Image (spheres, grey):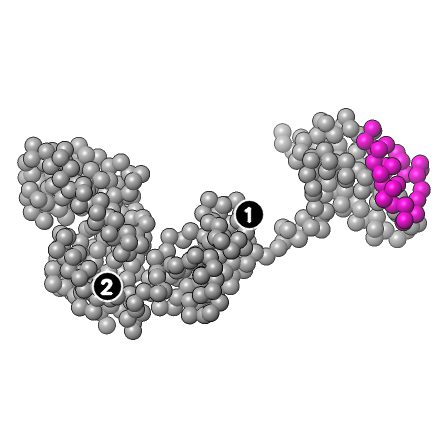
Amino acid sequence: MRSKTSALGVKKIIVLIVIAIFSFSSTFAYTDKELESKKTAYKKVIKVKVANKLENISEETLQKILILIDQFILKYKNKKNISDSTKLQKIAILSAFKEIISEKLEDDFWDINNIFKEINKKIEVIMITDKRCLSESCKLDSIMAQLKQIPQLSNLEFKILDYNEDEAKSIMKKNWITLLPAAIFSDNNISELKNYLKETNSWKYTLELWTSFDPTAKMSEKGFKILDKKVIEKIKNNSYIKWNKNSEILYLEYSDMECPYCAKLHNSWVLTSLEKKYWTKISYSLQHFPLGFHKNALPAAEVLECLAKQKWSESYFKLEHIIFKNKNSHLDFIIEESVKLWANKKTLEKCIENKEFSEKINSQQQFWTKMFWITWTPWNVLINTKTWEYSVINWAYPLSSFEDIIDKLLK
């Protein structure tokens, strides 16, 4: 059905152009100097002839007509077997016809050459990173590959800068960029990215990459950021920790109990593999980071805290495993599973009703957001408790990503 309609549209285009060219070609003659005035004269006559026909043609088809007209104009400009006066006459008729259609659409349309230039133009994006950043999020290859998959960005060209270069620092300052990696676009006329491009004060657009590396932070010789010793102590004093509590590596997982990616991370057996490989060298702590759009997230976090208070810290991690394994964060299910872990149901429900731990969870969430720039879950932080160095893995990455960073932290 569409091809039939399209064929009819093309026929209308050809008919209109033929009417324009041949109905008036014998009526007017002019010189090059008279082109503008003759075009105006043609325009008045053509309007009378085709006005009604244009009313029945869609906007999309009218735009196609404009492209065809430009092709005809180009053809007559290059034609050698006709006189100059005839050549200019044909071009004037086509130009008049083009103006009529443009006015009908109440818009200015580029000629065909500019349309081709626009289609084929190369878009340049500036990518800024820091070679000291060792996390997965700082690896630009995957980011650039994903951007090139967008049809509108097939001709995308990247300019890669390191934070230590003066140009990179200047761009970051002008565009309010504080975290890396960063992607800077010259315009936001990209439909697939429009909702993710943020305008800056220098008329540029930064692509939201949810990055976390602060190049101005204090760094160790190995390229890791360094925590204050007091922060590590605060974490240990306010967290449930399993495996070896005095280990060299502390793995903090900031999770939302309703988060499907958090469940994916747990069900991939990354934790079990890390415990087996590093044994006495690593400890693990689940940290609450309930996201606002997950209605079950905060209540589930509160149940975990209430259960651990009533029973023991081991139950905290057992319930965490049950929730993620079943991918079920509904309150009734979690309470039922807590009772199976020998919790007193009435005491548990009272703890939840009184929101005994909601303030603790919310205040910690605010603190960690500022400390580790957490924006989604899972957000993994690996800390060397002896050197105070740390690194972030901000997604459900495979085991190898964790091993790479842990091995470097242990060196």
Judged left or right of residue 27, residue 311 is: left
How many neighbours does mark 1 have within 10 angstroms: few (below 14), some (14-19), or many (20 or more)?
Answer: few
Say if 373 sits above or below 309 in the image.
below
Q: Amino acid at mark 1?
A: Asn
Say if 48 sits above or below 233 in the image.
above
How many neighbours does mark 2 have within 10 angstroms: few (below 14), some (14-19), or many (20 or more)?
Answer: some
Q: How many marks?
A: 2
Judging by the rendered image, the residue that carries numbered circle 1 is 189
In the foreground, 52 or 12 = 52
Q: Secondary structure at mark 1?
A: loop
Distance from Cα at disc 1 to Cα at disc 2: 41 Å
Q: Main secondary structure of the magenta part?
A: helix
In the foreground, 5 or 102 = 102
Asked if residue 47 lies in the magenta stretch, the reply is: yes
Labelled pair 1, 2 in contact (Cβ < 8 Å): no
The magenta stretch is 21-48
Judged left or right of residue 48, residue 7 is: left
Judged left or right of residue 124, residue 212 is: left
In the foreground, 141 or 95 = 95
Quarter location, residue 353: top left
Asked whether the viewer can see residue 187, the reply is yes
Q: Secondary structure at mark 2?
A: loop
